[in-house]
Amino acid sequence: MKRRKLEENIFKGMMFIALFLVFAVLAGIILVVTVKGLSSLNLSMIIDTPKGGYYLGKEGGIANAIVGSLYLMAGATFLAFVISLPVALALQKEYLGKRFADFTRLILDILWGTPSIVYGAFGFVVMVFLGLRASLLGGIIVLTLLMIPIMTRAMDETIRLVPFELKEMAYALGTTRMETTFAVVLKQALPGIFTAIILAFGRGIGDAASILFTAGYTDEIPSSLLDPVASLPLAVFFQVGTPVPEVQARAFAAALILLFIVMVINVIARLLGWRFSKNIVR
Amino acid sequence: MSKIKVKQLSVSYGNHEVLKNISLEIPERQIIAVIGPSGCGKTTLLKSMNRLLELNEDVAVSGDIYIDGTSIYHAETDVTCLRKKVGFLPQHPYPLPMSIYENVAFGPRIHGLDIAKTVSAFSKEGGGRKEKKREMDLLVEHYLSLAGLWEEVKDRLHAPAAKLSIGQQQRLALARVLSVEPEIILADEPTSALDPISAKLVETQFKILKQNYTIIFVTHILRQARRLADYIIFLYMGDLVEHELASQFFTEPRDKKTKDYITGEIS
Ligand SMILES: Nc1ncnc2c1ncn2[C@@H]1O[C@H](COP(=O)(O)OP(=O)(O)O)[C@@H](O)[C@H]1O
Ligand SMILES: [Mg+2]
């Protein structure tokens, strides 16, 4: 009896320590970014583009990077969604069959594990081949590719959780596969689909390597899809590496804004997921 | 004439043959009970009658089933029409992930049923949007009543169906099956997950419904078969042992296995 109690306590202790580490790291990141970035975060930082010399200047703000990241993510999230959802739905065994679906999952998991710099390099090669220069469009496309595997697989996992008996009920009424998919599978999986979008968004918005060569960098806000575009992760990347403290502080301000955007998007998605979960069958 | 004719039906999952050369005829507007020990192929037989079986992988069906004289395994059979005509009530009654109202309105909508015809007693002239909505309301009320659920849910039709008790969910499933106007209702141990009172309610509805529908239900409760069924199909390890009028089956069983089963010597 005593031994079992001891085991229980050791296990509880381990869980507690791990949990504490997770919270400590998160708190640490937020603390460092806030302390270092807050001082230089003011209205001008958010609404002005950089002044005083390329992206390493000390004047003006980082509106170019904020707007750039939002443009990139709006485009890439939309495109990735439009592609990922049909693929995830096709992975149901009614469509692809179990064997081919599992093969597709393997491919997606390999793509998911591929480092983003590889996506960047791939995009760059293709763009050179096509004679395109670094641009908003290039960045959107590469980010879309980067986001598709994670979005698709996350959607797939929630779709797979829909009980087979539930689909069977719909089929028993004489529905087609598409009617079952829309009326039952999507409704049941909706909160998970929001989560999938968020996971992919999180990977996309923070990624610097994939857009390093494909989106470029500029002090301007792009006025067309073919203009180069700045982004928050690259603003952090370039500015944090300088020896100038004022420029470094701007990097942390950019990081702080990045964190804030991710937080807001997460909260919105949770609210939406919660809003749409009332009919879910457990 | 018999409603359903099963001809030399064999079913295997992979290379495991679970129904072996079954032939039988099922009369119209009766309650038919399929009984037998668990794993003997009762669910499989039921699901072969509206081709739900083929949602499983690696399932092979040979032989054929005729409903109203028409082959259902014929290449040109429209499975959605077949399943509309042959409703299925599963053992675990999952509601669809929508409101109570939508659960019942869903089937008629996808099949584009002539709602006005069904509720013609109430419907007025004209087909404006308001009338359409009103007709659907009447239709939902009609089928919920037919399933014996209306009184319990009429004040919360737009609440999520998932909030209902399991006994209510089973009757909602029944209303949903009825809503597409089937002629045959297949029910797979429809009361096994229910409390005794809900089970009684479902049994009562079956007795009422048999005037207009052919009801085939699986049960492992002999007393339930005795209470409800006009006709009995007894399966044992994939073989059809006996199919017989209930009165005959319980009083003078022909087969030794039947005798042993109803006296409880095999189970
Ligand atoms: N999807 C399936 N895949 C493989 N074997 C199955 C499947 N469904 C049922 N079986 C097997 O077929 C036999 C009959 O099953 P079933 O028709 O469900 O019997 P019952 O409903 O009488 O309990 C059992 O041995 C069962 O293990
Ligand atoms: Mg069964």
Image (cartoon, coloured by chain):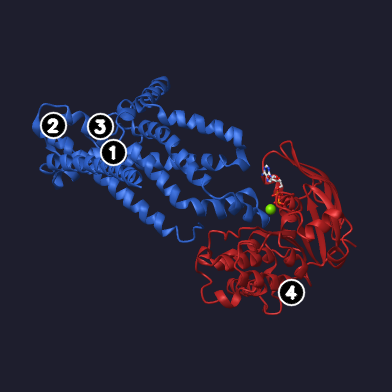
Chain colours: A blue, B red
A173 in relation to A112, above or below:
below
Chain letter of disc 2? A
Return the residue nearer the eye: B194 or A42: B194
- Labels 2 and 4 within one chain: no
* Left or right relative to A13: residue B19: right
Residue ID for mark 1:
A68
- Amino acid residing under circle 4: Ile
Q: Position of residue B137 (x, y in %)?
A: 60, 73
The quarter of the picture where the N terminus of chain B appears is: bottom right
- Percent coordinates x, y for residue A184 in the rendering: 56, 54
Q: Nearer the viewer, mark 1 or mark 4?
A: 4
Q: How many marks?
A: 4
Q: Residue at x 26, y 38 (%)?
A: A221
Which residue shows up at 43% across the image and 40% down it?
Answer: A151
The residue that mark 4 highlights is B208
Does dot 2 land on a helix, a strand or a loop?
A: loop
Q: Is residue B173 above or below residue A218?
A: below
* Horizontal side, residue B13 vs residue B21: left or right: left
Q: Are marks 3 and 2 in contact (CB under 8 Å)?
A: no
Q: In this figure, which residue is indicated by the disc labeled 3?
A: A234
- Mark 2 and mark 1 lie on one chain; the one further toward the N terminus is 2
The residues bearing labels 3 and 4 have C-alpha atoms spaced at a distance of 72 Å
Give the labeled residue for mark 2: A57
Q: Amino acid at mark 1?
A: Gly
